[in-house]
Image (cartoon, grey):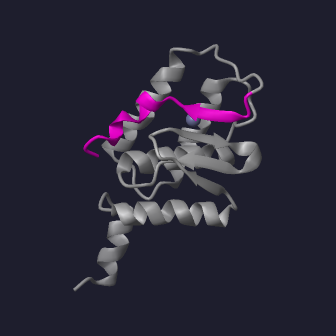
Amino acid sequence: MTKPLDRVASSVGSRVSKREMAEHVLRLCEEHSINIEWSATRKAWAAACFELIHIPPVRSSASYAIALHEIGHVLGPHQRTSVVLTAERGAWRWARRNALVWNDTMDRVMRRCLTFYEKRPNLRRDWRPIFVEEPDQIDGERGA
Ligand SMILES: [Zn+2]
């Protein structure tokens, strides 16, 4: 039998189920009127100007992290800067602050994504209103 206290603990500890993660993403998008376009591949992107994110279904910590990150491109800080690295960091900051849980897998996905942009600190956003995550950044998906 699950006592109320256990349920509270599970929502702040590391034992958040994948179902809870998926529901959290849906709830956030509903609350903030963000449209979700489901990706059949591991591609993910956000079009902040259209309040639209394109994400794989949330079935793991890795895809949860990516989903939160894309929402962060819509709701997070520094999303209007032309410096891509700054915008990426802002979106990850938002993801971490708003996650029900932040585990090693999620941290690995974040580090991999940020490393990609840290190697390209001069990358500027030009005409693209869309943040595209490179597919190989979402490799944390495996076994997560
Ligand atoms: Zn991004």
Look at the image and tell me in which quarter the N terminus lies.
bottom left
How many marks the image carries: the answer is 0
- Give the residue furthest to the front: 40
Is 100 rendered above or below residue 7?
above
Q: Nearer the viewer, residue 123 or 57?
A: 57
Which residue is located at x 47 percent, y 48 percent? 56
User: Which residues make up the magenta segment?
Assistant: 128-144
Which residue is located at x 47 percent, y 30 percent? 113
Report the side of 99 relative to 77 (left or right).
left
**Residue 46, position in %: x, y?**
63, 42
Is 139 rendered above or below residue 1?
above
Is 58 rendered above or below residue 88?
below
Which residue is located at x 33 percent, y 61 percent? 13
Question: Is 45 colored magenta in this rendering?
Answer: no
**Residue 129, position in %: x, y?**
73, 34
Report the side of 58 relative to 132 (left or right).
left
Which residue is located at x 45 percent, y 41 percent? 41
**Residue 68, position in %: x, y?**
52, 49
**Residue 31, position in %: x, y?**
65, 66
Q: Nearer the viewer, residue 129 or 78?
A: 129
Q: Nearer the viewer, residue 110 or 7?
A: 110
Q: Locate ligand 1 by image quadrant.
A: top right
Q: Image quarter for residue 101?
A: bottom left
- Give the residue furthest to the left: 1
Question: Is 143 colored magenta in this rendering?
Answer: yes
